Image: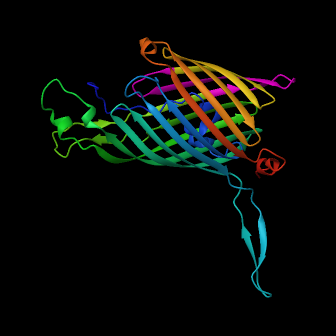
Amino acid sequence: MLTVFSAKSGEPVFSQYMMNQFLINPAFAGSEGFTSFNLTARQQWLGFEDAPMTQAISGQTRITKTSYVSKSRSVRKNTRKRRPSGKIGLGGYIYNDQNGPIGRTGLEFSYAYHLFVNDGQLSLGMSLSAYQFRVNTSDLETFEGYDPLIDEARESMFIPDGSIGIYYTYHPFYIGLSAKNLFQASVKFGSDNSFTDYQEVRNYYLITGYRYDMDNDFEIEPSILIKTTEAFNLQTDVSVKGYYKRDYWIGFSYRTGNAFITMVGIKVDKLYFGYAFDYSLNDIQRISYGSHEIMIGLKFGDSSGRYRWLNRF
C-alpha cells in the first residue's frame, strides 16, 4: 500500500522517443512524409509493486500535395476539385498511464503545418487532448483513521488539455521545442469548497540531434533531450544510436541522475521493432528488474512513392 500521494502526476516517460518524436511534439506529425502507426508499451521498475506502466498507440500522416482533378459529373458539366496543399500533417494518439494509485487514460489529436525555410523544413503544431484522471483511494493509507481528502474524494474526473510545438529539420540535423499540459488544468477531488485544487504542471521538451552518414552502410546519431517543468525540475537524456543499412540499430542513453538505457531494434520491410532496457541508478534497482519498453512501428511510403510525399509544394 502507498502512503504518499500527489496529484501532480508527471507526463509518461519513454526511452525510444527518437523513433516516434510525435509522442513529445505535435509539430512532428507528418514531418517525415510517412504514414506511420506506432505501439509503445512500457513497464517501469519490473517487480516493484504499483510501479508505473504506460501503453500508447499513435498514428500520423502527411496530407498530399496540391493538385486539381477534373471530374465529370455529366456530359455537360465538369468540376475541378482542389486537393490539400501538402503542408498539413495530422496525428492522433491514445494512451493509458498508471502510476501507483493515479491513472490517466486519454486521447490527443494533433494538427501540424509544414513550410520550407532555407532548404529546411519548419513545422508548427498544436494538439487538443482529453483524459480521464483516476485515483484509486483504496490503495491509499493514512496515519489518521479518517481523511476527508481521500475518503470523500471523487475517484474519476474528465480533464481537457493541449500542447504546442515547433520543429525544424535541415537534413540530417533536427531540433524541436514543445510544451505539454498547456492549460495546467485544475484537479478538484471533492465537491466541497474546502478541498484544495491541485494543478497539473506544464512540461517542456527540447530535443536536438544529428545523423552522420559514414558512407559505409553505417550511420551514427547523437541526440539530446532536455525536459523541465515551470518549477525547473530539469532532466536530460544524452543519447547515441548507431545504424547499419538503416535496418538494424543499437543505442545508449544516460538520463541524468536516473538511468542508463540500452536500445536495440530491427526493420523488416515496413515493420519496425524496438526494445529498451533502463538500468536505474538509484536504490530502487536493488528491488526491481529494471524498466522495459517495447515499440512496434509500421511505416508506409518508404519507397519510390515517398518522393511524391517529399515533393510537397
Which stretch did the figure color magenta? Answer: 208-235
- Report how many numbered discs are placed on residues in the image: 0
Q: Quadrant of the N terminus?
A: top left
Residue 85, placed above or below residue 307 = below
- 110 vs 117, left or right, is left
Query: How far from the left and from the top, in percent, is residue 194?
Result: 15, 39
Query: How far from the left and from the top, in percent, is residue 129?
Result: 46, 48
Quadrant in the rendering for residue 96: top left
Quadrant in the rendering for residue 23: top right
Query: How far from the left and from the top, in percent, is residue 10?
Result: 41, 31
- Work out whether residue 24 can be spotted: no
Q: Nearer the viewer, residue 282 or 92?
A: 282
Residue 252, placed above or below residue 248 = above
Q: Nearer the viewer, residue 91 or 126?
A: 91
The prevailing secondary structure element of the residues shown in magenta is strand
- 233 vs 144, left or right, is right
Q: Is residue 230 magenta?
A: yes
Q: Nearer the viewer, residue 197 or 306?
A: 306
Q: Which residue is at 31% across, 33% downward?
A: 7
Q: Is residue 175 magenta?
A: no
Q: Which residue is at 57% across, 33% downward?
A: 177
- Work out whether residue 235 can be spotted: yes
As drawn, the residue found furthest toward the bottom would be 76
Residue 67, placed above or below residue 244 = below
- 298 vs 110, left or right, is right
Q: Which residue is at 29% across, 38% downward?
A: 136
Q: Nearer the viewer, residue 176 or 237?
A: 237
